[in-house]
Image (tube, rainbow, N blue to C red):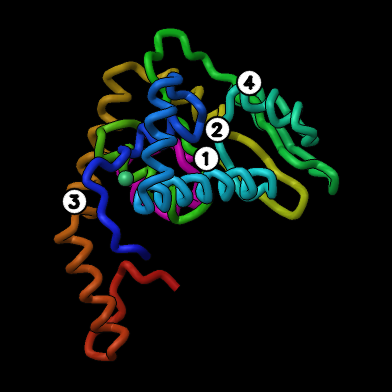
Amino acid sequence: MTTTRCSAALDDATLEAWWLGELDAGAALRADEHLLGCAACAQRAQALVAIAHGVHDATRAGAVRAVAGDALLERLAASGLRLREYRVPWNGSVNCTVAPDDDVMVARLQAPLAGVTRLDAVVTRSVDGAMSVLEAWACGLPVLMTEECHLPEGFAAGAAVRIGGGEGMGHLKFEISGGMGLVMAMSDEERAVMGRRGRELVEERFVWPKVARQMRTVYEWVLGTGPKPECVRM
Ligand SMILES: [Zn+2]
């Protein structure tokens, strides 16, 4: 790590635009000149490029599950990746087979979106996915999630619609659009109620003071000075 300071640092948005080639000629020239003469900003630019390459490599290696549009899929296909595509009917599910030479598995979801002004979709099976769910709840939004998010309290509180996510070796089953259809079929009022329950759940259980208190009970249990807390599931 360098300790060099820069008094006129290029901001993140400018660095990003510089990397994507989106700056106009004058701004690009100024950025180039600055990067040539400033070790601190050059190091940040290098880190940005490294992250972009990392995301690119992880995507190509199949480690990224993401919501994609047609433009991205067309670019992936044009870059020589083999895409296997399944169409998931509305309120239906489809069994998929993955072949060894498939690079990318695509599930096209169908749902009635008339009147929907905004739809945020996150695809993940990791604990990070739970963060996305908590963020949506904190914003008072209805949530579709799988069991793998490990937030069963969301189903119990009526703050989320359960969607399937069964997965085995070389075999996946998508049931997402069924849940999406359920949410779409709800009235605005029903969606608002579901979002409110999520918000309440976050305020009840996932704010810092609650989590800190819970962590203390875990530490006490680990040290043998307290009983196994409810939040530890084994
Ligand atoms: Zn600089």
Mark 3 falls on what kind of element? helix
Q: Three-letter amino acid code at disc 3? A: Glu
Judge whether 221 appears above or below 199 on screen. below
Which label sits in the foreground, 3 or 4? 4
- Between residue 69 and residue 57, name the one nearer to us: 57
Which residue bears the numbered disc 4? 70
Alpha-carbon distance for marks 1 and 2? 6 Å
CA neighbours of label 1 inside 10 A, class few (<14), some (14 to 19), many (20+): few
- Give the image quarter of residue 30: top left
Gap between marks 3 and 1 measured at Cα = 26 Å
The x, y position of residue 179, in whole percent, is 50, 30
Name the secondary structure under disc 1. Answer: loop
Q: Is residue 98 magenta?
A: no
Q: Secondary structure at mark 4?
A: helix
User: Residue 111 at what x, y percent from top left?
Assistant: 54, 19
Residue labelled with disc 1: 123
State the CA–CA distance, disc 2 to disc 4.
10 Å
Mark 1–mark 2 CB contact (< 8 Å): yes
With 17 as the anchor, is 103 left or right in this view?
Answer: right
Can you identify the residue that label 2 sits on? Answer: 67
Residue 119 lies in what quarter of the image?
A: top left
